[in-house]
Amino acid sequence: MNEFKPEGTMQNLIYTKAVLDRAMLSKKILEAKVKLCDENHNLILDLGCMKGFIPKEEAALGIKERTTKDIAVISRVNKICCFTVKGYKQINGENFAILSRTEAQKEAQEYLFSHCQPGDIIDAKITHLDKFGAFADIGCGIVGLISIENISVSRISHSKDRFYVGQNVNVVIKEKDEENKRFFLSHKELLGSWQENAELFAPGQTVAGCVRSVEDYGIFVELTPNLSGLAETGDYGEIPSGTGVSVYIKSIVPEKMKIKLSIVDIFREAVQPPEEYEYFVKGSHLDSFLYSVPNASRQTETIFKKV
């Protein structure tokens, strides 16, 4: 439902002068790769027919007001950048198209806040990974936060355990902060309920897994991002979180939401995030998400409250 896609989704990044002229008249948003950030932090883009010039104050929302740091501009080099065409100008004897990224971002931000509601599922691109969560572009460089507890049901110690920078993912809007113009996102509701994930496996199978934590009473092994089982402790030595293993499935007990495992082999290599995720939710909106089985003693549910 989001008309404004994350930066880097357009196919054609090389333009003729006629295309730029039409884009200027219609205020159409285009994209191109940033080739250089000059000594004054202006951005230079390759448009094909000529170079593009984005003045520093037009390179990112908040730069002009000094609420955004210059790193937001410097870090655009060698990345795709959205923009509108404002006009043309000769700089040191060379013709440039004068562009604005902030104009495109303001339009995207206005659209996102007026059209998107909690529970809406939209496209996103991971832009930054941190211990507390991941930041994702949800349209023209407008970024939202997926806090670590909302990335998956299975616990992770760092967002890099799930994502990599530049990865295209789906997210669901969890909350929007109108006053501070911030979006808070979630990912785990799209990865399926306990039952949906458990149905991918059967007792007697030996499957790949990933160690997420080692406790006195057992080892938690992740089978999918939203499903973990418990393996018995053994004389395995130290097993770091993220280590790949193969496990034998001893039993699956839906009413208790428990899976009993036995470790068959330890690979001593960290499991890398998948190239892309298989999502269980195929629509464009969620009113709620029930992770636990219906008759479980403890219910785990997300309710998306419309603003």
Image (spheres, rainbow, N blue to C red):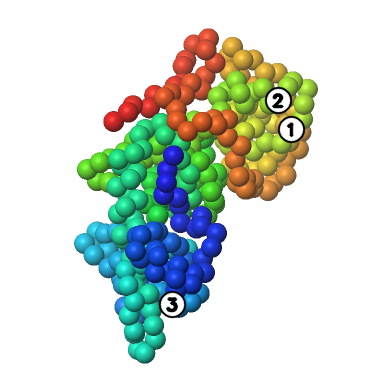
Name the residue that disc number 2 marks: 201
Q: Position of residue 28 (x, y in %)?
A: 39, 59
114 and 272: which one is in front?
114
Which quadrant of the rendered structure holds the N terminus?
A: top left
Of marks 3 and 1, the one in the foreground = 3
For badge 3, the amino acid type reads: Lys
Q: Secondary structure at mark 1?
A: strand
Name the residue that disc number 1 marks: 207
The residue at 58%/14% (across/down) is 256
Residue 153 visible in the picture = no
Task: Say few, some or many: other residues with alpha carbon within 10 Å of mark 2 (under 14 / 14 to 19 / 20 or more).
Answer: some
Of marks 2 and 3, the one in the foreground = 3
- Look at the numbered discs 2 and 1 and tell me whether their residues touch, using CB distance below 8 Å: yes
185 and 22: which one is in front?
22
Q: Secondary structure at mark 3?
A: strand
266 and 236: which one is in front?
266
Name the residue that disc number 3 marks: 51
Q: Secondary structure at mark 2?
A: loop
Classify 20 as above or below 92.
above
